[in-house]
Structure formats: structure tokens, C-alpha cells
Amino acid sequence: MYTQTMAGAMLVLALAGHSAEAFSGLGPAPLRANQQSSAVTFRGASGVSPVLRNGPARRGSFLTELKALSGPFGGKGWFSGPKERKSSGGTAVASKDSDVFKLAQENFKSWNDALLSKDHKKVAALYGTKDISFLPTVSPKFIQGTKDTEDYFVEFCKKLPDGTITADNVQPYGPDAYLHSGMYTFMTGPASDRQPVKARFSYMWRKVDGDWKIVHHHSSAVPKAPSAADEEAENEAMYPLAQENFKRWNDALQTKDYKNVAALYSTKKLSFLPTVSPNFIQGDADTEDYFANFVKKLPDGTITA
């Protein structure tokens, strides 16, 4: 007899040339005195040790059990992460207490500490040397090589940047890669005049020859939302045009030529609720009919506000 905990799932495989028999429950059946079993332990990259066990032969069938034991990535499987939730696209998003989320914070700190050292080579060394994709915050370039990465950080370090993450997500892609995305704020400039720069970011970190490297980095300043001052300036720019168009309309009334007035109205998708008519006018023929009568009143309009 042997006993076994129920942590993890049992995967029962029937080897080639043998039929799989029905297997009920998650735990294995007890061994009888004339039955034999053996176990082989494999160690994965995550440090978890699945146990491969060939159970008792039953009337010619050979069953192999694979049990995924609990480990640093939880009890849902050999490569599964703890307390993961699905993003809208279906990719696993790591919880904030997971190992991969903590790793992402540590790697960001290493990157930011390199910036604080003002050593551009130290920052650039955190980026991959092959197949890099780097779209930096304050450069129009698409950087794809180490030399351009170093050149960028020569100038960026002069701004004395210090970054703080304000919101982020981490999505693991196997044991050797993860995507870290979110929002961060950089304080830049001399101590006497530090200025905040809010930006959006995404990093793809990958383990290369045992070291974590950035193979993709996109950073862009948060677009400025239209302010009341911007909207007012836009309105001011349109004001002279609005006055000019009203004058054209009123001058057309003065000609007493209803066709001149109607020509200022759209012939498609028109919405016209006139002053002295109960009709909702939506076509050019009705527009002409209305102004044929309205111009007989000799109207002359003036904007008062």
C-alpha cells in the first residue's frame, strides 16, 4: 500500500500498443502484494519535481501517471503561476504576490538604478544585443542595436531621470520571459527645478545566457488632454469664420432670391427647424419652398450675443 496527497492533477497516459483503462478519481489505486511500481523524478527549470510513475500492469495495459507537484509557481501545474487572472485577450496576468511580479519590480529597479548612476553603458548593458526593439520616450528613432541604445542613454542620463511606476501589469510567457507594461512618472532636471514627465511603458524581459535582458522597450509620453484654455483658443480661431458665414447667409436673404439662400444649405442629411414653420425640413426642395415665403418678409438678421 502507498498513500499520496491529492495536490496537483493526475495525467494518465496509455503508451503505444496498450489500451488505456478507465481511471476514476485523482489518487492512484493501492498496490497489491504481487504488483510493482517505479518512480522517476525530473527537475524542471522552475525547480519543481514532477514524478513519473508507471503503475501496475492490468491485463496487458501499461499506465503512466504524471503528477505535477506543488512548487514556487503553485499547485495548478508545472509551469502555471499562482493566483493568475486572465486579461481580456486571454493572456495570464500575474498577481502582485507572485514571483514573476516581484521579479519584474526588481528588474525595473535595476534599470532605474542604472539611470541614477548616470552611466549610459550600464543602462545599455541591460538591453539585449540581438533582435532588440526599442522605441524610447524622447527620440523619434526605432532603435535596434547596442550602439544606438548607448547613444540614446548618453543624452537621456543628462536629464537626471528617476522613474517611479504608478500602475502596472506583468504577463509571464513561460519561465524565461515576461511582459511588463503600465504607467510611470519620471522626475527630470536639476535639483532646483525637477519636472515630472508621465509616460506609458512596455518592457519584454527575456533570460539570455542566464541573465535577464530587455529585448523590447516602448515608452511614450502620456498625450496631453485638451484643456479649457486649448478649447477656448480653438473657439476663438473659429469665431471669425462663423461671423463671416452668418453674413453670407444674411446677405443672401437681402437679395430676396430664395434660391441663393437655399444654396447655402446642404442637400443631404439636412436638419432644418425654421423660425416661422412647423415643418422639420430635411431636403433642398422644402428648403427652397420655405425661403420663397420667408424672403417676402424682407428679413435682416443681427447677432446680439
Image (spheres, rainbow, N blue to C red):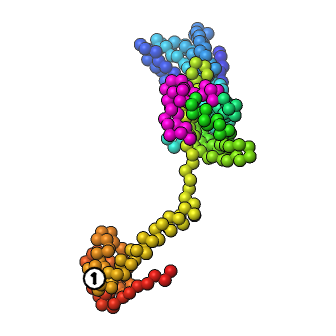
Name the residue: 55% across, 38% down: 136
Residue type indicated by callout 1: Tyr
Name the residue: 68% across, 43% down: 189
Image x and y of residue 251, in percent:
34, 81
Write down the residue under mark 1.
Answer: 258
Image x and y of residue 283, in percent:
28, 74
Q: Is residue 51 above or below residue 76?
A: above
> Left or right of 13: which side holds 163?
right
Name the residue: 40% across, 77% down: 246
Image x and y of residue 204, in percent:
55, 32
Residue span colored magenta: 120-149
Confirm whether the magenta stretch covers residue 249.
no
Image x and y of residue 17, in percent:
41, 13
Quadrant the N terminus occupies: top right
> Left or right of 301: which side holds 43?
right
Residue 167 visible to the viewer = no
Q: Is residue 222 above or below residue 264?
A: above
Answer with the quarter of the image where residue 119 lies: top right
* Residue farthest along the bottom direction in this orientation: 297
Confirm whether the magenta stretch covers residue 140.
yes
Residue 42 visible to the viewer = yes
